[in-house]
Image (cartoon, helix red, strand yellow):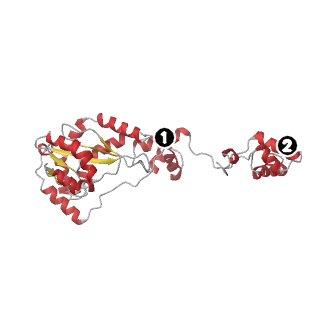
Amino acid sequence: MPGKRARRHFSQLNECERGLIIGMKTAGWSTHRVSGQVERSECAVRNCWEQWTREGTHGRKVGFGETRKTTRREDRRIVRQALVEPTVTHSTIRADVGVAIVPQTISRHLAEANLKSKRPFQALPFTPEHQQLRLQWYQARSMWNVTDCQKIVFSDEYRFVLGTDDNRMRVWRRPAYDSRSTLIVVRRTLTGQRYVDDIFRPHVGPCLNGLPGAIFQQDNARPHTARVAQDFLRHFQTLPWPALSPDMSPVEHVWDELKWQMSSCHSVHDLELALQDLWAHLPQDNIRCLINSMPDRVKACIADGGGSTLY
C-alpha cells in the first residue's frame, strides 16, 4: 500500500541489527545510509548509536515494571471462581486465592477471560400504577391450580450475543407442559410483521390448533402488541399479561438455565448450534416444574402487594 511502512519498521531492533548499526556507524557511515541498509528508521538507528556512545552497550534495557502478584494457577482460580459463582465479589475471590491483590488486578484477569462485571438487577422499576395492576391481575387468578396452569402455552424470545454486536440474533421458543417447539432463530430485528410471518403462521398457529383448550401467553413487547399480531391472535384464546412481570414467567427461568450452560462461541453459527443442542437436551421435567410453580408465584406476589417476588 503506497505510503504505508512495513510492520517490521516499527518493531524492536534485534541483537544482530544493533551490532550491524554499531559496526557501520563506527566505519563512518551516515545515519541515513545505515537506515537504508538495515531497513530501519533513522530515529531507531540514531537511538541505538547514542546508547552505544553514551553507555558502551547496545543491549535492550531491562524493564522496571512491577512483578506479577499471582501465578498462572492463581489466575485460573480467579476466573473459575467467577464462572462457578457469577455474583461473587472481589473480596471473596481475594480471600479464596489467598494473595494480597487489589480489585483492579482481579478485574484485569477476568477481562482477559472475556468476563465483565455488571451490577446485579435488584428489583423491577415498578410505579404504584404498575404494582396495583399486577396485584389486580394476580388477585383475579388467586384460585389457579396446577391443572389450570398446565393449559397455558408460554412463549418468549431472548437475545444471545457473542459481543457488543452479533447482527441481533434472537431465538424464540414455545414450551408447554408436555411439549415444546423447536428453537426458532431470528437473525434480523423482530418486527410485528416478521413476528406473524416467521413465528405465528408457521409455528404458533399449527401448535395451538393441535392443543384443544390451550391458552397462549406472551409478554407486552412491541412486536407482540402490534396490530398485525393482535389481529392474528383473535382466533385463539390468549392470556393477558401484566406489564413488567418477567418474574412470573416460567420461560424466563428456562432462558436463564440455557444461558448459564452456554459455553463460549466464536461465531454466530456456533452459537446457534450450541443453543439448539442445549434446547434439545433440556429435560421436560424442568419445564413442568416451573409451570407447576405458577400458583405459588401468584400467592407470593399477592402477599407482597403486587411487588417483585423471589421467583
Q: Give, as a three-letter code, the residue at label 2.
A: Gly
Viewer-closest of 162 and 81: 162
Picture coordinates of residue 63, whole percent (x, y): 69, 48
Using the rendered view, name the quadrant where residue 273 is placed.
Answer: top left
Q: Give, as a three-letter code, the residue at label 1.
A: Arg
107 sits left or right of 221 in the view: right
Q: Quick one: label 1 or label 2, which is nearer the N terminus?
A: 2
**Element assignment for label 2:** helix
Q: Residue furthest right?
A: 27
Viewer-closest of 62 and 18: 18
Taking the spot 36% from the left edge, 39% from the top edge, the residue there is: 272
Viewer-closest of 45 and 113: 45
Disc 1 + disc 2, Cβ < 8 Å: no
Taking the spot 22% from the left edge, 62% from the top edge, the residue there is: 131
Q: Nearer the viewer, mark 1 or mark 2?
A: 2
Q: Is residue 151 visible?
A: yes
18 sits left or right of 280 in the view: right
**Element assignment for label 1:** helix
Within 10 Å of disc 1 (Cα), the crowding (few <14, some 14-19, many 20+) is some
Picture coordinates of residue 185, whole percent (x, y): 32, 43
Taking the spot 78% from the left edge, 46% from the top edge, the residue there is: 36
Within 10 Å of disc 2 (Cα), the crowding (few <14, some 14-19, many 20+) is some
Picture coordinates of residue 70, whole percent (x, y): 56, 43
Q: Is residue 311 visible?
A: no
Count of all numbered marks drawn on residues in the image: 2
Give the number of the disc on residue 77: 1
Cα distance in 3D space between marks 1 and 2: 50 Å
Taking the spot 30% from the left edge, 61% from the top edge, the residue there is: 125
Picture coordinates of residue 179, whole percent (x, y): 20, 37
64 sits left or right of 113 in the view: right
Q: Residue furthest front?
A: 2
Which residue bears the numbered disc 2? Answer: 23
